[in-house]
Amino acid sequence: MKYFSASFYYVNYPVLGRIIRQTYKQFKWRIWLLSVMFIFLYSVNQFIHLIFRIIDEIFFPGFHKKQIKEPVFIISNPRSGTTYLHRLIALDKERFAFTKFSHTFQMTTSFAKFYNVIRWIDRNVFRGLISKTMDKVDEKFWGGWDDIHALGFNKTEEDEMVFAQQMMSTGIFIPFPYFHLTNDTKFLDNETADVRTNVMDFYESSIKRFMHANADGKTYLAKNVMSTGRFKTLLQRFPDAKIIYIARHPYDAVPSFASMFSAMYKLHSPEMPDNHPAKKAWAQLGIDFFKYSQEMKRLLPPAQFIELKYDDLLNDPQGTVLKIYKHFNWQPSEKFLEKLTKEEVRNRQYKSHHEYSLEQYGFTKQEVYHALGPIMDELGFDKEF
């Protein structure tokens, strides 16, 4: 449904309608309650977001003239090091502008300026009290995700919320155990031309609003694991974009993807087995993303695309980042290099405590290799059976 122009407001309400219909087809009180909470919080967020967008139109109309040149998108399957790489490159604050978790809820000029004012007051008046309080809130609400995907209102974060607000993100299905019953939102590139145009109008407008407040002369840097299914649409809108792609062994990436995005099922369906079709659908999407990602190589010239391996990033994060800079002819500053070295030392001892297997989600290595064999061989991934 479209009001005014899609750049101001756009929501694909039929997707929300299908979520509601699936929820109320059968009685399960936990899912019903979750659905009510989801719709309430979504409506509140939409209302607040509209207020900020209206304020933008009145007080900051200059965002309309903002041009988004050579944006950088980090794309991969989930759980493939995108968050880590994004936060490393984001240390180069002289070159890049990027969203923090708090920005993604209200990606507007007015909210970004409000955020900056609150940060200034916190530093100069309250001596960091607000930041410390928010860190405690983050630990309370997101602490359990630290070893999966570290979250925090003041942490660098992907901009997937902009797509979720339009009901055009697979993320909106995270709370609901019927991802296997729909193909909605998985591949924006497969949607009709009008849907793709409306989604990108809203997305581009959101980036312009954010950049108008934060980034004179800077480049927009985003990481988004779900953009594998929309990379063609992104390139149609931003033909000079640069894409960084990270490849992780499918035997590790696919089950980790399924585990992360079905984690909330334990809240309402603790008895659900790992090989349930709803969880298996997430793993299948990971396989489909691997297949689709290979089209990036064929469609993008080397000057706009670089492919990395997950293990190389973990083993040599600084070297990997500098490889990216060399590939795109970016000159790293001394200040950035110093930050990069410190961050590498800080994360050197990190090791995930989670292990997942394909078999948990109803797949075998033979099946995955049958689907992805040529890709795995090209990337040098052992089939291991």
Image: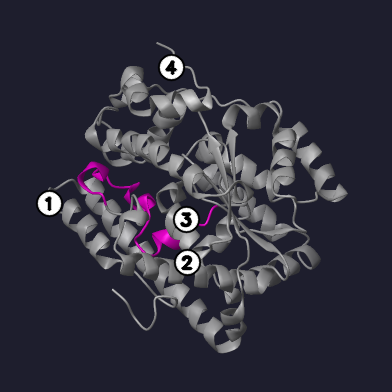
Q: Secondary structure at mark 2?
A: helix
Extreme residue in the bottom direction: 58
Along the line of sight, which residue is nearer the eye, 308 or 101?
308
Relative depth, front residue between 175 and 142: 175
User: In which image quadrant can residue 370 be found?
Assistant: top left
Which-is-in-front pick, marks 1 and 2? 2
Q: Nearer the viewer, mark 2 or mark 4?
A: 4
State which region is magenta. Answer: 158-183
Mark whose residue sits in front, 3 or 1: 3
On residue 160, the disc is: 3
Give residue 203's mark.
Answer: 2
Compare marks 4 and 1 and give the one earlier in the sequence: 1
Amino acid identity at mark 2: Tyr
**Vertical relation: 130 (above or below) 377:** below
Q: Are marks 1 and 2 in contact (CB under 8 Å)?
A: no
Q: What distance separates the C-alpha of mark 4 from that of mark 1?
A: 42 Å
What amino acid type should be assigned to the residue bearing mark 3? Answer: Glu
Residue 164 is covered by the magenta coloring = yes
Q: Are marks 3 and 2 in contact (CB under 8 Å)?
A: no
Q: Earlier in the sequence, mark 1 or mark 2?
A: 1
- Cα separation, mark 2 vs mark 4, equals 39 Å
Q: Nearer the viewer, mark 3 or mark 2?
A: 2
The kind of secondary structure element at disc 1 is: loop
Q: Amino acid at mark 1?
A: Lys
Judge left or right: residue 328 versus residue 107.
right
Give the residue drawn at x 30%, y 35%: 279
Q: Label 4 amino acid? A: Lys
Which residue is pictured at 32% across the width and 49% down the height? 173
- Which residue was labeled with disc 1? 25
* SS label for mark 4: loop
Q: Which residue is mark 4?
A: 383
Which residue is found at the position 51% from the left and 36% from the top? 148
